Image: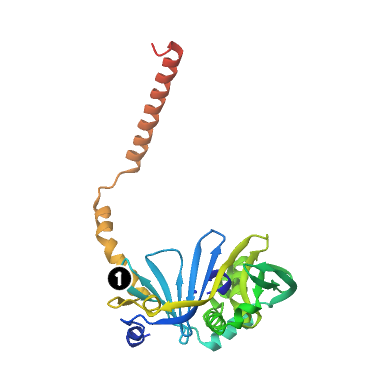
């Protein structure tokens, strides 16, 4: 998960995130918008974060210490564990990076503009000194807040870029820049929070619109609702597949229409359209007499 773009256990851990009381904790709320004008809100405490992406039906919860991430789905009344189905070892990860990934740099360009109340420094994301991927405008002052810095570091730990690197080796420059975006996440905790991201054509792809560093967050909004069932992604996919299975069976049971029947229906439709057109032309000629 890339901070610049997204600004994102066992049952015992899930249970520990469910509480009935709602004490208030100090936190930070970061609001942003992407190139599609979709708004998102990140609520952060010392050990937890919540990401709302504009839908009232679901949101993400993160345990910042463990890196565990869950989707809370109100429509289904379930919590989905987003842990990857395949764990990549550190040895394999490093081998992939060494073999496939070229040099990625976050090159300082100078002072950037003020972005929604924060002074920024302009950096350019480059690959092999030749491929210009994006421009990032980082706010050093924003990560002076330890809650924000901890969140940025946690997000970076979850985005090693290995999947993107593999895709890049197969498909090329665009995927290579996606991998680079994940890799440079590691530098944000020291250089600054990405307040604005721009693609190589100069289009703004992400911008933080507001930061409230003195928010009060309740346990109720930062925890998993009591009584929600915990499912893995595979279990959720199976549940949805089982739900549509009867519909698919009904479709499969419908009598098949031969290609000749389909072609005849098209010919009949074309004939009716020609006759209708001819009739309208005749009426126009006669003044609808």
Residue 29, image x and y in percent? 50, 74
Which residue is located at x 57 percent, y 60 percent? Answer: 35
Residue 115, percent across and down?
A: 64, 67
Is disc 1 placed on a helix, strand or loop?
Answer: loop
Please report the residue visible at 54 percent of the width from the left and 88 percent of the height from the top.
Answer: 90
Q: Quadrant of residue 271?
A: top left
Q: Nearer the viewer, residue 55 or 232?
A: 55
Closer to us: 289 or 60: 60
The residue beneath circle 1 is 77
Q: Quadrant of the C terminus?
A: top left
Dot 1 surroundings within 10 Å: few (below 14), some, or many (20 or more)?
some
Q: Is residue 151 above or below residue 176?
A: below
Position of 105 with respect to 169 (left or right) is right
Find residue 136 and report its image quarter.
Answer: bottom right
- The quadrant where residue 231 appears: bottom left
- Of residues 128 and 149, the one nearer the viewer is 149
Q: Residue at x 44, y 79 (%)?
A: 62
| Residue 129, visible in the rendered structure | no
Kindly tell me whether residue 274 is visible in this rendering. Answer: yes
Vertical comparison of 30 with 48: above or below:
above
In the image shown, does 114 or 110 lie closer to the viewer?
114
Residue 64, image x and y in percent?
47, 84
- Indicate whether 93 appears above or below 31: below
């Amino acid at each position: 998960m890339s901070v610049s773009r997204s600004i994102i256990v066992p049952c015992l851990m899930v249970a520990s995130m469910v509480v009935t009381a709602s004490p208030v904790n100090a936190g930070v709320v970061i609001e942003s918008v992407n190139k599609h004008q979709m708004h998102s809100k990140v609520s952060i405490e010392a050990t937890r974060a919540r990401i709302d992406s504009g839908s009232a039906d679901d949101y993400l919860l993160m345990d910042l210490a463990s890196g565990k991430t869950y989707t809370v789905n109100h429509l289904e009344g379930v919590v989905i564990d987003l842990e990857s189905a395949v764990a990549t070892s550190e040895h394999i990860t490093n081998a992939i990076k060494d073999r496939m990934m070229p040099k990625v740099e976050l090159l300082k360009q100078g002072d950037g503009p003020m972005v929604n109340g924060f002074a920024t420094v302009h950096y350019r994301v480059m690959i092999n000194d030749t491929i210009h991927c994006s421009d990032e405008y980082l706010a050093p002052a924003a990560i002076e807040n330890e809650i924000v810095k901890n969140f940025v570091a946690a997000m970076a730990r979850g985005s090693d870029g290995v999947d993107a690197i593999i895709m890049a080796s197969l498909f090329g420059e665009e995927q290579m820049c996606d991998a680079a975006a994940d890799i440079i996440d590691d530098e944000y905790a020291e250089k600054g929070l990405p307040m604005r991201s721009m693609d190589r054509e100069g289009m703004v792809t992400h911008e933080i619109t507001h930061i409230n560093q003195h928010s009060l967050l309740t346990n109720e909004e930062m925890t998993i609702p009591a009584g929600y069932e915990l499912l893995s992604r595979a279990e959720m996919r199976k549940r949805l597949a089982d739900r549509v299975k009867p519909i698919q069976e009904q479709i499969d049971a419908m009598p098949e229409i031969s290609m000749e029947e389909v072609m005849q229906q098209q010919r009949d439709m074309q004939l009716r359209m020609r006759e209708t057109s001819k009739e309208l032309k005749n009426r126009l000629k006669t003044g609808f007499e």
